[in-house]
Amino acid sequence: MFTITLKGKPDKNRPDFVKITMVIYRPGYNRVPKILPITGLYKHWVQSQQRFKPKTENAAASNALLASTVNKYLQVGNAWDDQQVRWTPKELSHYYDKPREVMLRETVVPTVEQVYRKWISEIRETKKMKNGHEIPCEAYAKANERILDFLTRFVKEKYDRAFYNLEFMDITEQFLKDYVFYIESEGAKKGNRGGLRGKLHSLYQVVKKAEKKGIPGADVDAFVCTNEKFREQEHESSAISLTLLKAMESMDRTPLSEKESYYLDLFLFCFYCGGMAPIDAAYLTWPCIDTKKHKITYERTKTPKKAQPIFVPRAEKIVEKYRNHCYGNFVLPIFGKQHDTHAKKKNRMTYICGEVNTALRRIVSILGFDEEITWYSARGTYITMMVDQKCSPEVVAKHAGCSVSTLYKYYWKNLRESEIIAELCEEFSD
């Protein structure tokens, strides 16, 4: 349902004459005005009736022309509605600027939702090969579907309009500021940031794709106002102290079960191999290892980065210990024959990560330490150790498969902070 209304007001250039504007309104869109080339004396215009007073100068001809003009646009809009075509008031306002058939539009401007869903579909169909294994992008597609649902809710609650009507010209700086506030408000209810960076990045990618395709209104420059929000909040490394690590290496394993001992080996393997992430350790295969050069080369699962850690003797000793228990050409016995789909591998990783983390916490407790630890702590611990031992950051980044800036931003941990604070307090004490 849509409406077309005529509005008349004094012409600024000729105050005695009326300037008539046709206003097209459709629920879910902003009103679109279009100035008509029809005029007359302002004193003869009757706003309540949207026409000139009868029997005044040229009233009959002007009123007939107004009615004819409105009727033409009504016919086009009704025809599109009958075809169940998605159209915008702006498109209707420009329809006769370039003549087209009433029953079929020449072009259709894609909406934000259409581009968003097409992008998600492309992600879902994308497949990547990592270290000889096919890795689907279903998880990334689902993550963006959740963001799309969130964005749809925002548009409805903030602007009371349907998301499928949203055009790229609607994504202005003010829209983005409102979106940021909404994300932060929703996140505050749960005590977090609401996934702010991920949600902004997702929408940015869609606008960027639309701009490259030349879709009207798509402008990534609008995101400049969100630059500060794209910056990550301070990240606390999960690295553990080297004292604890050495205690774990040399501990008496008698109190541990066979599985707990295996889980400890998985943690130590990741530490020895350049701080390898658990998911990368699970997918690691023998073709990635050059035993003669004592070198591992693999592509990280979650990023397109390549990592090249050293295959040190301690890591080799662990893999030899479990070699007869491995399936296929996997280096570690994490995946088995039954894990024949990506979904099953994902479920397996979720389960084993939980088991490893539980075992590590128990081990730390047995050793008498009070430190937080997870399987992923192996990554930050290796990087911290190497940096503190004055190893070149470029070399450490190569081992870990990340950039130098990422290395310091996420993984390195100042393990001497408490000592430094104590020393400074003593140095500057009264």
Image (tube, helix red, strand yellow):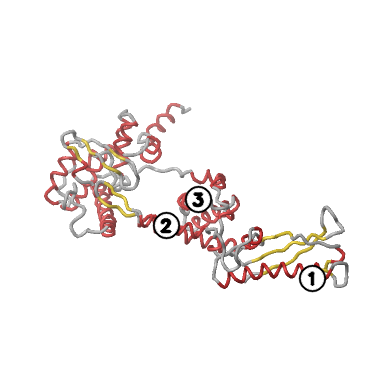
For label 1, the residue is: 48
Kind of residue at badge 3: Lys
The secondary element bearing badge 2 is classed as helix
- Comparing labels 2 and 3, the label whose residue is closer to the camera: 3
201 over 341 or under it: above or below: above
Residue 241 visible somewhere in the drawing = no
- Comparing labels 3 and 1, the label whose residue is closer to the camera: 3
Kind of residue at badge 2: Ile
* Position of residue 286 measured from the top left corner of the image (x, y, whole percent): 18, 44
Kind of residue at badge 1: Ser
Q: For residue 120, which numbered disc appears in the image?
A: 2
* Position of residue 332 measured from the top left corner of the image (x, y, whole percent): 19, 48
The secondary element bearing badge 1 is classed as loop
For label 3, the residue is: 213
Left or right of residue 132, residue 413 in this image: right
Left or right of residue 186, residue 31 in this image: right
